[in-house]
Amino acid sequence: MNSKVWTVAALKDALQFLGLEKSGTTLDLAARLVNFLAKPHDNVKAAPAGKAAAKEPAAKGTKRAREEKKGAPTDAKGKKAKKPKKPEGYPKSNVTAFMHFSAEKRAGIKAQNPDAGVTDVAKLLGFEWKATDDKSKWEAIAVADKQRFKEELAKFNETHA
């Protein structure tokens, strides 16, 4: 006989899915689940008449969940408000060490894997970056680029204050 051990988390997830109370001891949770399964129609709460069902929370990791969490600003139609454009002459942002590494190595990886798509090339670049022991060359370039950005931003802020 194949028996599964229900963990407290699994019991709570099942009860939450069924819309039942999910607090109490393990025995309480198991009893509540068994009672529901014995008579599911007696335990279902009726939705208020004339009202639409409440919107379920978005699944974790989805775009909608991230927007709900952030409380993204919306326009009059309820759509996400567009991010304001940067002013004219705003300095180009600094680039990370990995991006400098990718720019240098991308052509070689594309030559070795001509049939690889954009995502495949990105994965291969990631694997190669992870396998690289000496990253100091690209990290030094990134530090210099960050310094460049800070200086250009300071100049921009002085002129556009």
Image: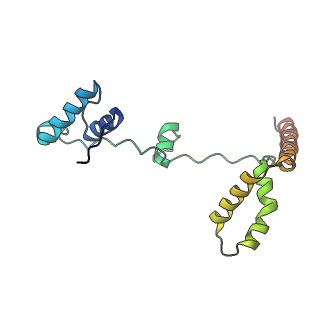
Q: Position of residue 134 (x, y in %)?
A: 83, 49
- Could you say which is closer to the camera, residue 114 or residue 79? 114
Q: Is residue 94 visible?
A: yes
According to the image, what is the colour scheme of the structure?
rainbow
Which quadrant of the view contains residue 22? top left
Residue 79 shown left or right of residue 151 in the figure: left
Residue at the spot 64% in from the left edge and 65% down from the top edge = 120
User: Hey, which residue is sitting farthest top in the picture?
Assistant: 24
Where's the C terminus, which quadrant?
top right
Front position in the image: 112 or 119? 112
Which residue is nearer to you in this view: 5 or 16? Answer: 5
Tally the numbered discs. Answer: 0
Query: Could you tell whether 13 is left or right of 72 in the image?
Result: left
Position of 114 relative to 24 (above/below) = below
Q: Residue furthest front?
A: 1
Image position of 11 with respect to 124: above or below: above
Q: Is residue 75 left or right of residue 117?
A: left
User: Can residue 44 be seen here?
Assistant: no
Provide residue 5's location: percent of width, then percent of height.
Answer: 30, 38
Name which residue lies at 78% across and 68% down: 107
* Image vertical order of residue 110 relative to residue 17, above or below: below
Q: Nearer the viewer, residue 23 or 86?
A: 23
Q: Is residue 116 above or below residue 157?
A: below
Residue 81, position as x, y percentages in the image: 55, 46
* Residue drawn at 62 percent across, 46 percent down: 83
| 129 sits to left or right of 67 | right
| Residue at 12% in and 42% down | 41
Check the image and name the residue furthest to the bottom. 115
Q: Position of residue 65 (x, y in %)?
A: 46, 43
